[in-house]
Amino acid sequence: MGAKSSIVRADGEGEKLWFYGGGIHTWKATAQDTDGSLSLFEDTLVRGKCTPLHHHPHHEEVVYVIEGEILVHREDGDRRVGPGSTLVTPRGVPHAFVVVSETARLLFLNTPGVGETFYRRASIPVDVSGKDGPVDFQKIAEAAMETGATVILGPPPFARAQP
């Protein structure tokens, strides 16, 4: 099981994975680190990165906007949020987002840490360039089906990736 001590990871520290949905994930605390209680990663994104409409059946998701701006789709409509904003999405609640600033940095907390299986299945290690790669929604859908940690409900619910 995970460590029974504090976890300290400074800015830039942590395992880096390129997510097929777009973005570089820097893992700050894993489910293994926390005996499954949570997982935490920072996501670095560019304008236009969006998620399909989806929900998480087995974990809550908390997103904190460090830098940039995103447009969030929720059950009561769309809302633009920027630095310092917090989004709390209970399990089973449909949601999506699109990056509307040039870049964005988001901190994702999943509790319990079961959602990590989806992100890891839908990611590969960052190559030496450290750059983001092309979005592959098919690989995202496969990871969602295989892990059950994310349920894809439909395409991104935005008219276009709204800059």
Image (cartoon, helix red, strand yellow):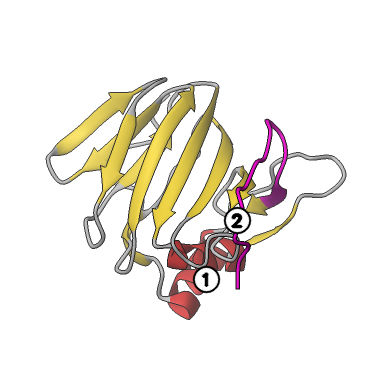
Q: Residue at x 71, y 48 (%)?
A: 16
Horizontal and vertical percent for residue 112?
39, 62
Q: Is residue 51 left or right of residue 125?
A: left
Give yes or no for contact between labels 1 and 2 (Cβ–Cβ under 8 Å).
yes
Type of amino acid under label 2? Tyr
Q: Residue at x 62, y 49 (%)?
A: 27
Type of amino acid under label 1? Ala
Q: Looking at the image, which residue sits at the far left?
A: 76
Q: Residue at x 51, y 59 (%)?
A: 137
Q: Residue at x 21, y 56 (%)?
A: 93
The residue that mark 2 highlights is 20
Quadrant of the image containing the C terminus: top left
As rendered, which of 94 and 27 lies closer to the eye?
Answer: 27
Q: Is residue 138 left or right of residue 114?
A: right
Q: CA distance from mark 1 to mark 2?
A: 10 Å
Q: Looking at the image, which residue sits at the far bottom?
A: 146
Q: On the image, which quarter does residue 24 sit in?
A: top right
Residue 159 sits above or below residue 27 on the image: above
What residue span does the magenta drawing correspond to? 1-17
Horizontal and vertical percent for residue 118?
51, 66
The circle on residue 143 is 1
Around disc 1, counting alpha carbons within 10 Å, would you say few (fewer than 14), some (14 to 19), or many (20 or more)?
many
Asked which secondary structure carries label 2, the reply is loop
Horizontal and vertical percent for residue 96?
33, 46
Q: Give whichever of discs 1 and 2 has the lower sequence position.
A: 2
